[in-house]
Image (tube, grey):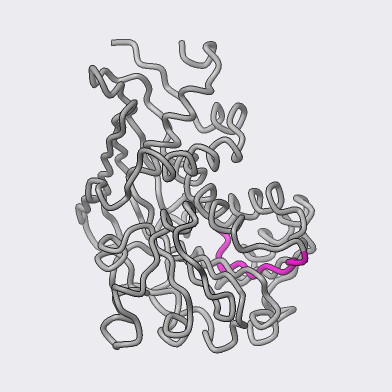
Amino acid sequence: MNIPHITNKHILDHIRVGDAVDALERALRTEIDPSQDFPRSFFQLDEGKRLLFMASHAPEWVGAKIMSVNEGNPARNVDRAQGLYVLMDALTTTPKAIIDGDELTDLRTAAMTSLVTSRFINLDSSSVVMYGYGAQARKHAQVLRELHPQLKKLVVAGRNARKTEMFAATAAELGWNARIGQAMPPQTAIPQADLIITATGSGEPLFDGSLVRPGTLVVALGTHNNERSELDTALMARSNVIVEDVDTAVNESGEIAHAIAEGVLSRESLIPVRDVVRGDVRIDRSKPTVYKTVGMPWQDLVVAGEIYTRMPSTALR
């Protein structure tokens, strides 16, 4: 069987992030109910290393992704998450393509963020605080500049000063007015931010949630297990909380699990992102809003199908 291999470079060369955003929005409005998605499977290898298996199905496509998550990789200058996606025809389950999982994961995560930010970022929004400097942070910096050009100010915070400075320099090349956290500390930057993104994998809250002003959107995407949390419960208690799916968030998000355990958040108060996209819920703009994402298999499937459909025939040989 001769199966095309769609590489990270193919995706970068031929797919616009707007295409992925549109595909995800169409899916949520029509054929996809995240609560019906297959659960993600985790396999622990040893300390700091595990495999993830993510399968999903839709009327046109079925597929699965296998990813490794290695906490030691950033110190080796290797991405934490790596893997491959197998896309199949839904009718015959014939494999149609193998897709590099790195760029697929980065693209679908940034596209989901953009689907949410498009409903919360105003024309007068300008300031972003970014925690992290890895692959997801880099992709989000690129996508936000492309889709929200009114966002111009970026404060970058990270544990490694050299990597933080390098990220800020790269962001400046994308058109950001970028500063590092040492130049503008969180206690100054957080209250001014219109958008805060956490992309670190940290097991501890990154900032004091009481500093976040009403109306600010916080996107937490760096963790996907119910033990680790980038946000404190003080922020979760006073915010609208949007999730991909309620059961998935309770089982896989430390931010959600900790807040529920402390009695400051309930399952019933969680807002499914599908309801936000479809306009079925009213958001209280007098409060901060947290979008907590852990990533779900349906997102990979939708974006993988869009990639395959839009890929030129020369790349599918």
Q: Is residue 50 left or right of residue 255?
A: left
Picture quadrant of residue 55: top left
> Measured along the vertical axis of the image, is residue 153 above or below residue 300?
below
Residue at the spot 40% in from the left edge and 84% down from the top edge: 233
Residue at the spot 44% in from the left edge and 44% down from the top edge: 29
Indicate the position of residue 7 as horizontal and vertical percent values: 48, 28
Q: Is residue 150 left or right of residue 238?
A: right
Indicate the position of residue 103 as horizontal and vertical percent values: 49, 40
Indicate the position of residue 125 as horizontal and vertical percent values: 73, 66
Q: Nearer the viewer, residue 126 or 279?
A: 279
> Measured along the vertical axis of the image, is residue 56 above or below residue 280?
above
Residue at the spot 23% in from the left edge and 17% down from the top edge: 92
Residue at the spot 26% in from the left edge and 49% down from the top edge: 51
Q: Provide the residue span drawn in magenta.
A: 124-133
User: In this figure, what is the number of numbered marks?
Assistant: 0
Q: Is residue 297 left or right of residue 288?
A: left
